[in-house]
Amino acid sequence: MAKGEVVVVTGASAGLGRAIAHEFSRHGARVGLIARGKQGLRDAKRECEQLGGEAIALPADVADHDAVEQAATAVERKWGRIDVWVNNAMASVFSPVAQMRPEEYKRVTEVTYLGYVYGTMAALRRMAKRDRGHIVQVGSALAYRSIPLQSAYCGAKHAISGFTDSLRCELHHDKSNIKLAAVHMPALNTTQFNWVLNRLPRKPQPVPPIFQPEVGARAVYFAAHHDRREMWVGMPTVMAIVGQKVIPGLLDRYLGRTGYDSQQYDGLADPREPNNIWAPVAGAHRTHGDFDQRAQDHSTQLWLNINRWLALAAAAGAVAGLVGTMRTKRSPVLEEDLAA
């Protein structure tokens, strides 16, 4: 896409959403930033402009269909179109099902699932006029393989996959040129673990191995400019998705044993810690969470995914070279046999 493309990113005030906005801005995009926290949006806007893009801050709760529509209208009014829409906003609760409350399931579903539905609807209405555009759904390995203690979030991510597949069929039926991609993430070092609603005895963490959010942002940028149905980011994501298809029962038992400890670290949780389920956490926010020392800033699997034709060519070259070496080693023996 040429410099100056118009992009909307939800959940853009911190974490992966902020990293995605940065990635598009590095390529000169004009980015509409949607989130609830006004200070986080102001900071993200400033950073996008420093990186070479343009940006507007659009305070909105993605669980509110009308608010999402108003934000989309504001982007279209300012820049005339929407080329790419990235659904990323999320909410989660770390809690056993027995301790969850009905209103918490409702809220997580409204943000993490219906927020994607409302964003997709807003994008489609505007892209249909031009019969082009790209919608990217930020998914997760948890959309395929659920883990304990995040039942609301895992359920919402599964729902997004079902919704997206249904819509994709309709776009094919309509012979639409609008593209739809899902990018499934591994554990990322984002700020969500600082403000998630937590009922665990210790502080929450992403399940290791952990990747920096810029790894996910690069995948989203690539997906927005190539016709990929899905992208799996990081080898842990590949292993979780494939494992669920092959050995789901074994994974149930394995995660039952390990899934509690792997999502907690570093001492007792503070029950007074603010969470962002019902309102944004006040103050400045960041792209990275608290796990920089443990997070990887590169994924070989993602590089191979993005450069798969180059990887296949290299593999074919290696095989050809191996075959050539084997023939060379065999040839003296053949000559001796002929001489005899």
Image: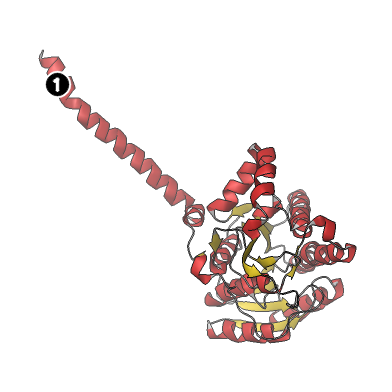
- SS at badge 1: helix
Does 336 appear above or below 48?
above
| Residue 272 image point, x, y percent | 75, 78
- Residue 183 appearing in the image: no
What residue is shown with label 1?
Answer: 335
Does 260 appear above or below 288?
above
- Indicate the quadrant containing the N terminus: top left, top right, bottom left or bottom right: bottom right
Q: Is residue 128 left or right of residue 191?
A: right
| Residue 117 image point, x, y percent | 80, 62
| Residue 214 image point, x, y percent | 54, 68
Q: Residues within 10 Å of mark 1 (few under 14, many from 20)?
A: few
Q: Amino acid at mark 1?
A: Glu
The residue that appears at 70% across and 73% down in the rendered structure is 11
The residue that appears at 52% across and 71% down in the rendered structure is 292
| Residue 307 image point, x, y percent | 47, 54
Q: Is residue 340 left or right of residue 115?
A: left
Q: How is the image coloured?
A: secondary structure
